[in-house]
Image (spheres, rainbow, N blue to C red):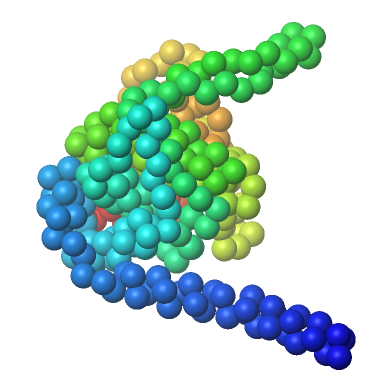
């Protein structure tokens, strides 16, 4: 009898594991299909003008993704910040924008968003000469952690949402890192479908990254200055910075860096230059 009970328990556990993805899909479909709250629609029009550029089908999908995102990902105020519907709607809209084209889950490793009123300080160990580790303090407006958290400064979120043509958006930037971190540390090479896609991505990204660093090393600021110097930090930051441009200044990115735009278009499965 104990053996039979153990067998039945194991069978039920296996069935639960097998049925869990189906339950999640059905739950998300139900939430995405709920009427979008009119108050949220007004907040989108007022605070996230980038959404108005989207084709109607993308706007509809974005609203469904937002409802699921807000149902599953808590946004927690830090340093005494009280999280409002404006904050939640703004962050959800910009975080879900990179998910519009491809079906790749809803940031499965993300557990919560920590929202600060303004810039915040993080400390991390840095190796100095002789191998001695010391804590380095950095003031940041956003950061994505592979441990399931995204940290954001609300004043920068507002600024980025209100000026959708300047190419700077901290939410898009940090959630691009989340896509890059799926399955491992951010390295500028997010999940791609085939080995050939990785080879093509690697070639284009490396060429563009090296060209940016070469231009900065020579202090040659003539010609294309579209890609911010911060992108030269490392390949992960390059991908995140270019993602900001892809959604905010796609026509310029396509004109000045057509191969780079093509890779981003293939990854996100979107063509914002045509919106």
Instruction: Name the image quarter holding residue 253.
Output: top left
User: Residue 150, how many percent across, how many down?
Assistant: 47, 40
Q: Is residue 191 left or right of residue 161?
A: right
Q: Quadrant of the N terminus?
A: bottom right
| Outermost residue toward the top in this view | 129
When asked about the image quadrant of residue 166, the answer is: top left
Residue at 46% x, 74% y is 25
Q: Is residue 84 above or below residue 100?
A: above
Image coordinates for residue 12, horizontal then vertical, percent: 68, 83
Task: Tell which of 59 and 241 is nearer to you.
Answer: 59
User: What residue sits 37% from the left and 37% below the top?
Assistant: 77
Looking at the image, residue 106 lies above or below residue 127: below
Q: Residue at x 25, y 43 (%)?
A: 84
What residue is rendered at 56% in x and 75% in y? 20
Asked whether, in this view, residue 171 is left or right of residue 23, the answer is left
Number of marks = 0
Q: Is residue 45 visible?
A: yes
Check the picture and name the quadrant holding the C terminus: bottom left
Q: Is residue 250 visible?
A: no
x, y percent for residue 134: 68, 13
Residue 170 appears left or right of 210: left
């Amino acid at each position: 009898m104990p053996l039979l009970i153990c067998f039945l328990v194991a069978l039920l556990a296996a069935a639960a594991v097998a049925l869990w993805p189906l339950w999640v899909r059905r739950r998300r479909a139900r939430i995405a299909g709920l009427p979008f709250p009119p108050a949220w629609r007004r907040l989108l029009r007022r605070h996230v003008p980038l959404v108005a550029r989207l084709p109607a089908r993308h706007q509809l999908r974005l609203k469904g993704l937002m409802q699921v995102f807000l149902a599953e990902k808590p946004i927690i105020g830090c340093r005494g910040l009280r999280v409002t519907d404006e904050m939640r709607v703004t962050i959800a809209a910009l975080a879900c924008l990179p998910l519009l084209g491809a079906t790749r889950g809803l940031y499965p490793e993300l557990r919560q968003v920590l929202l600060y009123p303004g810039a915040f300080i993080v400390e991390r160990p840095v190796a100095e000469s002789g191998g001695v580790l010391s804590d380095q303090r950095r003031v940041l407006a956003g950061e994505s952690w592979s441990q399931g958290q995204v940290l954001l400064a609300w004043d920068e979120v507002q600024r980025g949402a209100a000026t959708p043509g300047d190419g700077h958006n901290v939410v898009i930037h940090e959630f691009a890192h989340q896509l890059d971190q799926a399955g491992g540390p951010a390295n500028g090479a997010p999940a791609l479908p085939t080995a050939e896609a990785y080879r093509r991505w690697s070639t284009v990204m490396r060429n563009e990254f090296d060209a940016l660093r070469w231009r900065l090393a020579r202090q040659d600021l003539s010609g294309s200055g579209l890609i911010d110097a911060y992108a030269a930090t490392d390949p992960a930051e390059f991908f995140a910075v270019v993602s900001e441009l892809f959604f905010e200044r796609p026509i310029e990115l396509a004109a000045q860096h057509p191969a780079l735009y093509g890779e981003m278009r293939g990854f996100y499965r979107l063509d914002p230059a045509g919106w």
